[in-house]
Image (cartoon, rainbow, N blue to C red):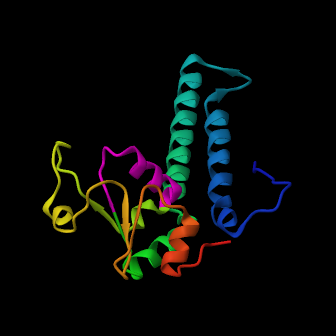
Amino acid sequence: MYYQRDFPLSSMDEKYSLDVTLWISSCATLWRYSRIGDTMTRKGKQIATWGIIIVLGAAGTFFLVRASNAPGKLDGFAQCLKDKEAVFYGAFWCSHCQNQKAMFGKSAKLLPYVECSTADGQGQLPVCTEKKITGYPIWEFSDGSRETGEVSLEKLSQKTGCPLPQ
């Protein structure tokens, strides 16, 4: 027994289509071996149910891990910002800083971000005090200029020369 697709797959999906086929086949096999004749025993139903739950759990975990390891849409842009020596100063409790990070989605982990707040949220770290950071978020660029507040991706592209993906 195998699963037949009626739609084209991307190259990423083709790589993992065999795994999906094997998992579906495993579920069918568990169900088939848990039967005695045409009637399923209570023990057989339990075995089949738990087997299917385990296989589906493993499949779900596999796809979640695969999805979380996929590159973000703005990875190249975020890396370019870092390469162009742009710096994003913020605080964990700052809602505008969170919004700025959200603009980058999964690529936010690559931002040249400097946390300015102390762990208790009551003070500022010396690195930000020395740079005279007085509010959040602040972007500082290699030419010494600054932009305050939530800065659009287009503005960041203009200030740094980093191209935005199409």
* Residue placed furthest toward the right: 6
Position in image of residue 138 (x %, y %) = 36, 61
Position in image of residue 109 (x %, y %) = 40, 62
Quadrant containing the C terminus is bottom right
Q: Residue at x 53, y 79 (%)?
A: 162
Tell me if residue 112 comes above or below residue 117 in the rendering.
below
Nearest the eye: 121 or 42 = 121
Indicate yes or no whether the magenta region holds residue 80: no
Tell me if residue 52 comes above or below residue 79 in the rendering.
above
Q: Is residue 147 left or right of residue 37?
A: left
* Residue placed furthest toward the left: 126
- State the image quarter where residue 158 is shown: bottom right
Q: Is residue 103 left or right of residue 166?
A: left
Per the rendered image, the range of residues in magenta is 89-106
Nearest the eye: 13 or 133 = 133
Q: Is residue 26 left or right of residue 129?
A: right
Number of dots carrying numbers? 0
- State the image quarter where residue 34 is shown: top right
Q: Residue at x 62, y 48 (%)?
A: 23
Position in image of residue 65 (x %, y %) = 48, 54
Q: Is residue 61 left or right of residue 85?
A: right
> Magenta segment, principal secondary structure?
helix
Q: Residue at x 65, y 41 (%)?
A: 29
Position in image of residue 165 (x %, y %) = 63, 72
Q: Residue at x 54, y 68 (%)?
A: 155
